[in-house]
Image: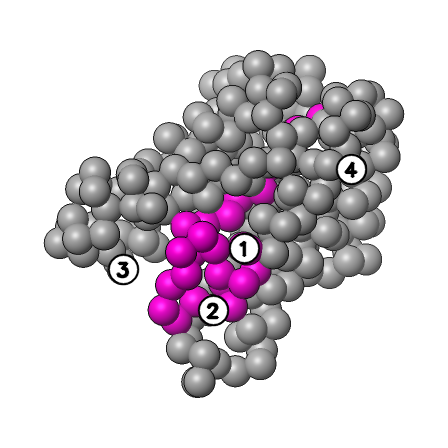
Amino acid sequence: MKRALVTGASGALGAAICRRLAADGCHVYVHANRNLRLAESLSVEIIAGGGSAHAVVFDVTDHAQTASALTNLLVDGPIQIVVNNAGIHDDAVMPGMRADQWSRVIAVSLNGFFNVTQPLLLPMIATRWGRIINISSVAALAGNRGQTNYAAAKAGLHGATKSLALELASRGVTVNAIAPGIIASPMSDKVFTKTLIDQLVPMKRAGTPDEVADLAAYLASARAGYISGQIISINGAMI
């Protein structure tokens, strides 16, 4: 059984990815930063449905805390699938953006990627099989007003994805990024009205978390063994 870690799994997208990987036979570590209740609830749901899951809580921006948590997980063996989904928004136009708004967003999406992924690499490489999937955003490809910090963090993931893919290509480990557009969730539903979605998305609808999860599951599978170093958009033809 492959062991998978999905960060930021207490949100709609992360939860959908956890469910899908569990349905594919993975043991899934359901990560949350502070919301242990949601992570445990999702784990219970997966187990009740016949899957295998375990809730874990740590702050991906805290290098020492993350390293300690991952050391505990690695006692049971290597983690071969990593989905770096943790990310936050703290929007403001650049002239009015505070330094802490910039730093926090970068810390979660970009520093979190390093803190989570780096300790898992050598055990993964030793198995000669692995999948690293970084969740990015259309904002990293096209930009977005008020999200200079978020776009910069996610665009940084693109460069890291391509570089790490080159480093691991001969070791049986693939590294890819998924760049979603507008995906339906309780948070996005408050921001994107139907009228606005019709203006922005040629398909005239938001994507669903399950559609992104299906793509992540494919990239995490053996079938995607020759796909690496790619930034794959899923945005209803926005760009």
User: Nearer the viewer's eye, disc 4 or disc 3?
Assistant: 4
Q: What's the amino acid at mark 2? A: Thr
| 89 lies left or right of 63 | left
Magenta highlight range: 130-155
In the displayed structure image, the side of residue 138 where residue 64 appears, left or right: right
Q: Secondary structure at mark 1?
A: helix
Sequence-wise, the earlier of marks 1 and 4 is 1
Q: Give the quarter of the image for residue 204.
A: top left
Which kind of residue does numbered mark 3 sit on? Val
Give the quarter of the figure containing the N terminus. Answer: top right
The image's mark for residue 148 is: 2
- Foreground: 42 or 212? 212
Residue at which label 1 appears: 154
SS at badge 2: helix
Task: Count up the numbered dots.
Answer: 4
Q: Which residue is mark 3?
A: 191
Q: Identity of the amino acid at label 4?
A: Glu
Figure check: 213 above or below 31: above
Q: Is residue 139 above or below residue 55?
A: below
